[in-house]
Amino acid sequence: MSDHNSEANTFNNTPAPSALNIPTRMASRMHRTVPVIGWGAFKIGRNQGAKYPNAFDIPSEADAISLVRELIKDGVRLIDTAPAYGLSEERLGKVFASLPTELRSELFISTKVGETCVDGVSSFDFSPAAVTDSVARSVAKLNCAFVDAVFVHSNGSDKDIIQESGCVEALGDLKNKSIIGSVGFSSKTILGGEIALKHPLIDAVMLEIHPDATDMLTLLPLAHELGKAVFVKKPLASGTLDPKIALPWLLAHKHITSVVIGGLNPRRLRDNFMMASLAK
């Protein structure tokens, strides 16, 4: 307990740099505003099987925790993770456990279900029992009594997962028990995104959209019509696009709720977050 108190005091007493002023957007099914840009915590937990153009080393636990703390101090309020991100949830949980209650309440934390990864090899289980167990493990690792959103981590069989596996219904039950705030689906196909948006239990979708992948833009009017949130994954095409072009282009689409960017370089991340803070 003393360690957590000591860490919490650093949040209260250490002067923060000029805080990012990240705007928020609202989708009615979320029942709260969401920052227009958030941080994806893949790289603090896993590098095997990563679909990035350049290899990278996973930071030490101390460096990972330091980075997360710096991002939160700087004003980042949306953090996305997943069981498939290796050590990510556990490392985030060590930071979250140290946060003052008021600061913790400002964060929007999302994780996923359906995919696990061992030694860079993914396996998938979308059964209700697996989903329930996965959320329980995530909540424990994240040191959170409540997770703001849980997305189904699709393996590409979007339609079957949504309509046949029972995973969405299992997440709906967890939402009814106030263990999670919103049910989401991370789609790999346009059809899957459409089915997810039309599903009565799903509140949000996560789609790959960027200047080199525009097909899923066709789903934005439907999402807006149904009041459902759209989170964008891989907005920089796994680091191959210029953020000065891609981020303003994405956020000019008013029906995109939030984009999630990854990375380990604090200065580069801050530049990207500042760029997004200009969005209206």
Image (cartoon, rainbow, N blue to C red):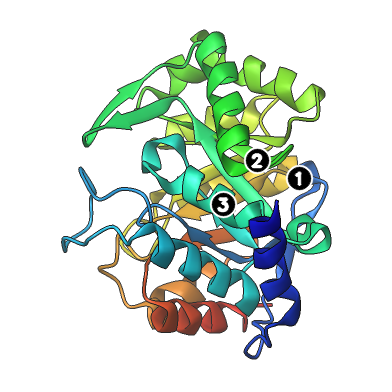
Q: Compare residues 38 and 17 and report the one nearer the observer.
A: 17
Q: Which residue is mark 2?
A: 149
Q: Is residue 2 above or below residue 265?
A: above
- Where residue 170 sits: x, y (%)? 64, 16
Q: Which mark is residue 94?
A: 3
Which type of secondary structure does the marked residue at label 3 adopt? helix
Residue neighbourhood size for the residue with mark 3, other residues' Cα within 10 Å, grouped as few (<14), some (14–19), many (≥20):
some
* Mark nearer the viewer, 2 or 1: 2
Res 262 quadrant in image: bottom left
Q: Position of residue 226 (x, y in %)?
A: 73, 40
- Which disc number belongs to residue 134? none
- Three-letter code, disc 3: Lys
- Residue type at mark 1: give it: Met
Q: Nearer the viewer, mark 1 or mark 3?
A: 3
Residue at 50% of width from left, 8% of height from top? 164
Residue appearing at x 49%, y 44% in the figure: 90
Quick one: which residue is furthest to the front in this view? 2
Name which residue lies at 69% across and 49% down: 224
* Foreground of the two, 82 or 14: 14
Does residue 36 lie above or below 111 as drawn? below
Would you name the residue on which mark 1 appears? Answer: 30
Residue 44 occupies which quadrant of the picture? Answer: bottom left
Q: CB atoms at circles 2 and 1 under 8 Å apart?
A: yes
Q: Quadrant of residue 19?
A: bottom right
Q: Position of residue 129 (x, y in %)?
A: 55, 10
Crowd class of label 1 (few under 14; some 14 to 19; many from 20; radius 10 Å): some
The alpha-carbon separation of the residues under discs 1 and 3 comes to 26 Å
Q: Residue 167 appears at what percent x and percent y?
A: 56, 17
The image shows residue 97, relative to residue 118, as above or below, that is below
Nearest the viewer among 4 and 111 is 4
The crowd level at tag 2 (other Cα within 10 Å; few <14, some 14-19, many 20+) is many
